[in-house]
Image (spheres, rainbow, N blue to C red):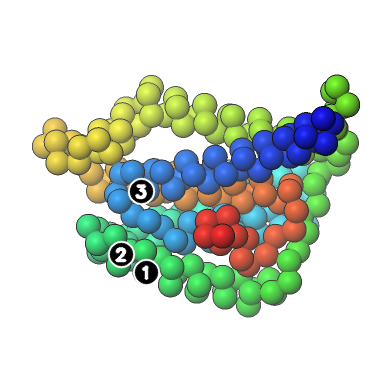
Amino acid sequence: MKVVLDQLFAGLGVGAVLLLIALGLTFTFGQMGVINMAHGEFIMAGAYTAYVLQDVVGSQSLLVALPVAFVIAGTAGLVLERVLIRRFYGRPLDTLLLTWGVSLILQQLARDVFGAPNVQVNAPSWLGGGLTIAGVRMAYSRLFIMVLVLVAVAGIWVYLNRLAQGRRMRAVMQNRQLAACSGIGTERVDRRTFFIGSGLAGVAGVALTLLGPIGPTLGTNYIVD
């Protein structure tokens, strides 16, 4: 029984990260019908952001990396949407192949910059250790991931249900033509949606550094495999 509970807790940590990844994909696919195969590389970008910052910031690098990774991955997604994807709306197969090509390019770029071998991001000292409840060891790092995802999900709920920008996003997701007729700038909403969805992938990448080594194919392992 203890083994089952240990595995269940470990699975909850991974599942929480997958939830964060899926949220970002849901935004871009639900609103624009885009299957973004480069979404995994935004995860990778977030992970490498934490890797770079650990030598710059020190023990607080994880907390700094979360907003920085959100902005970096979100900006990368915004650039991808503005430069390439928006020209292929309504052509799902073309956008799938296009973003897959971008994914391969970004993976090779990561190999050129950071090298092909996986690297380790050291967890901050304040996440060392864990709790033991009913004989089940609960690492602080995985508890942190779960809390992080809960906060992110709550933030997304507030954004979608309490803020005008979020309600516009929901309107475009439900009926783009009617939203446009109502005066909502759908292109502006698309840009914001891609930024948020990609930014969530970056945050997921930071969370994944607490689960093990990272490498150029980190995102693909979660998106494709």
Picture residue at 56% right of the left edge, 60% below the top: 225
Residue placed under numbered mark 2 in the picture: 93
Circles 1, 3 touching at the beta carbon (< 8 Å)? no
Circles 2, 3 touching at the beta carbon (< 8 Å)? no
Of labels 2 and 3, earlier in sequence is 3
- Residue 13: % across, % down: 68, 39
Camera-nearest label, 2 or 3: 2
Picture residue at 61% right of the left edge, 66% below the top: 217
Judging depth in this view, the residue of 208 and 92 nearest the camera is 92
Residue placed under numbered mark 1 in the picture: 97
Circles 2, 1 touching at the beta carbon (< 8 Å)? yes
Q: Amino acid at mark 3?
A: Phe
Residue placed under numbered mark 3 in the picture: 29
In the current view of this chain or complex, which residue is farthest to the left? 181
Numbered disc 2: secondary structure: helix
Separation of residues labelled 1 and 3 (CA atoms): 15 Å
Badge 3: residue crowd in 10 Å (few <14, some 14–19, many ≥20): some
Picture residue at 65% right of the left edge, 55% below the top: 47
Q: Is residue 212 left or right of residue 198?
A: right
Q: Is residue 10 left or right of residue 67?
A: right
- Residue 29: % across, % down: 35, 48
Separation of residues labelled 2 and 1 (CA atoms): 6 Å
Compared to 138, does 185 lie above or below?
A: below
> Number of marks in the image?
3
Of labels 1 and 3, earlier in sequence is 3
Q: Amino acid at mark 1?
A: Leu
Numbered disc 3: secondary structure: helix
- Residue 180: % across, % down: 15, 40
Judging depth in this view, the residue of 15 and 60 nearest the camera is 15
